[in-house]
């Protein structure tokens, strides 16, 4: 069924989101506080608005920026959007779904977004309107293409109606849709970005050491991308609460760290942290190697909290 969707914050994420849903035949209005942004979308023939007008709209997708100041996330734009949206919600009689696409720390939706929406609308989340957290995984350089062909869609919701409503409009994009709790959806977006940041940092550290050894780091990285099980097996190492064990990983990480330090090959801050994190986990559980070969990782996709919606 075609929906009327208002995108609140038509930047990188909002623009790609709105265009994705337009391509599936939905009506999309791009709402932004910036006149420049609205003018850009209007010039492309899109519907734009400054005020959030909701009477005949089914879904709001909040995509405003959540920047950091002194390493702390700032919700001023989000709060402004929520206040305005909540005030508008007070005036509509039909069910409305609010989907938040912003990156927000775990707990933000339940402790800030929902209470604010309820306060300004005088309505109840889960009854009069629905709330979902729907993190975006796009890469900025290929934003529209990534949104049009998502490798996964994660929907965090505390009520079934909201989850199903959002799932319906994502089905034409992919069958890889996961339903989970709101806080899990918020956290997984951070875990996603922190993993990518860690992987990039690891290869940067290897690059620095290789440069100091006079070795081509590009060759090393390409080969490791094929040889390391952590690269080719997506289930490798993702079960938390277990240190790495066996004969090789503990001894080789320490031996290389000492080698690099002795030769003055540069800081290996990440490797130091890896060794420390592992040591703080305690001793590997007995039977660890056996568990690995039994493909224990197969259950690691967190079936407790994340179910594919049938
Ligand atoms: N850029 C990315 O690659 C990316 C990827 C995934 C997730 N995210 C997250 O998505 C969110 C949006 O990021 P972005 O990069 O699209 O931001 P952006 O800065 O490109 O766009 C945000 C837009 O929101 C508008 N805006 C701000 N307050 C508003 C309000 N109250 N009402 C209406 N419009 C308002 C701004 O004018 C701007 O056009 C952030 O939480 C970000 O962390 C970004």
Image (cartoon, rainbow, N blue to C red):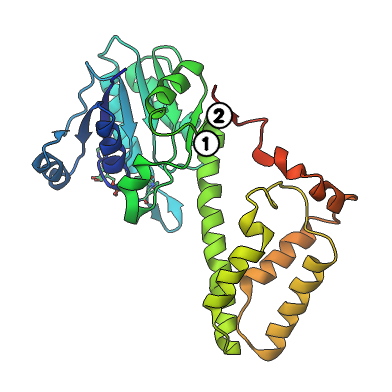
Q: Position of residue 31 (x, y in %)?
A: 21, 35
Mark on residue 234?
none
Residue wearing tag 2: 181
Residue wearing tag 1: 185
Outermost top residue? 93
Question: Against 40, is 81 above or below?
Answer: above
Q: Is residue 170 visible?
A: yes
Question: Against 95, is 207 above or below?
Answer: below
The residue at the point 46 percent across, 16 percent down is 161
Q: Quadrant of residue 134?
A: top left
Could you tell me which secondary element the residue under label 1 belongs to? helix
Out of 190 and 149, give the one closest to the viewer: 149
Q: Position of residue 150 (x, y in %)?
A: 42, 41
Whereabouts is ligand 1, in terms of quadrant? top left
Q: Is residue 82 visible?
A: no
Instruction: Verify CB contact (< 8 Å) between mark 2 and mark 1.
Output: yes
The residue at the point 25 percent across, 21 percent down is 88
Left or right of residue 169, residue 41 in this image: left
Left or right of residue 192, residue 63 in this image: left
Q: Position of residue 90 (x, y in %)?
A: 29, 16
Q: Residues within 10 Å of mark 2 (few under 14, many from 20)?
A: some
Q: Position of residue 221 (x, y in %)?
A: 57, 71
């Amino acid at each position: 069924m075609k929906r009327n969707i208002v995108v609140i914050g038509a930047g990188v994420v909002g623009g790609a989101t709105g265009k994705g849903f337009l391509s599936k035949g939905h009506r999309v209005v791009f709402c932004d506080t910036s006149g420049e942004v609205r003018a850009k979308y209007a010039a492309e023939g899109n519907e734009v608005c400054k005020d959030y007008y909701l009477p005949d709209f089914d879904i709001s997708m909040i995509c405003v920026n959540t920047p950091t100041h002194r390493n702390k996330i700032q919700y001023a734009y989000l709060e402004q959007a929520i206040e305005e949206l909540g005030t508008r919600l007070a005036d509509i009689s039909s069910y409305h779904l609010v989907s938040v696409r912003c990156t927000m720390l775990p707990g933000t939706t339940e402790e800030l977004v929902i209470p604010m929406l309820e306060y300004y609308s005088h309505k109840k989340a889960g009854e009069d309107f629905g709330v979902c957290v729907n993190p975006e995984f796009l890469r900025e350089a290929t934003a529209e293409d990534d949104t049009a062909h998502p490798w996964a869609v994660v929907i965090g919701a505390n009520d079934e109606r909201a989850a199903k409503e959002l799932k319906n409009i994502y089905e034409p994009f992919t069958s890889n849709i996961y339903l989970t709790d709101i806080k899990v959806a918020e956290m997984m977006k951070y875990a996603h970005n922190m993993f990518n940041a860690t992987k990039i940092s690891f290869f940067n550290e290897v690059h620095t050491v290789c440069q100091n050894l006079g070795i081509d780091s590009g060759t090393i990285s390409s080969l490791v991308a094929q040889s390391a099980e952590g690269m080719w097996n997506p289930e490798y190492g993702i079960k938390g609460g277990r240190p790495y064990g066996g004969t090789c990983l503990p001894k080789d990480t320490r031996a290389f760290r000492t080698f690099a330090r002795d030769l003055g090959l540069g800081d290996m801050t990440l490797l130091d942290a890896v060794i420390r994190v592992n040591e703080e986990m305690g001793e590997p559980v007995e039977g660890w190697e056996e568990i690995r070969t039994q493909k224990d990782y197969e259950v690691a996709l967190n079936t407790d909290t994340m179910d594919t919606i049938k």
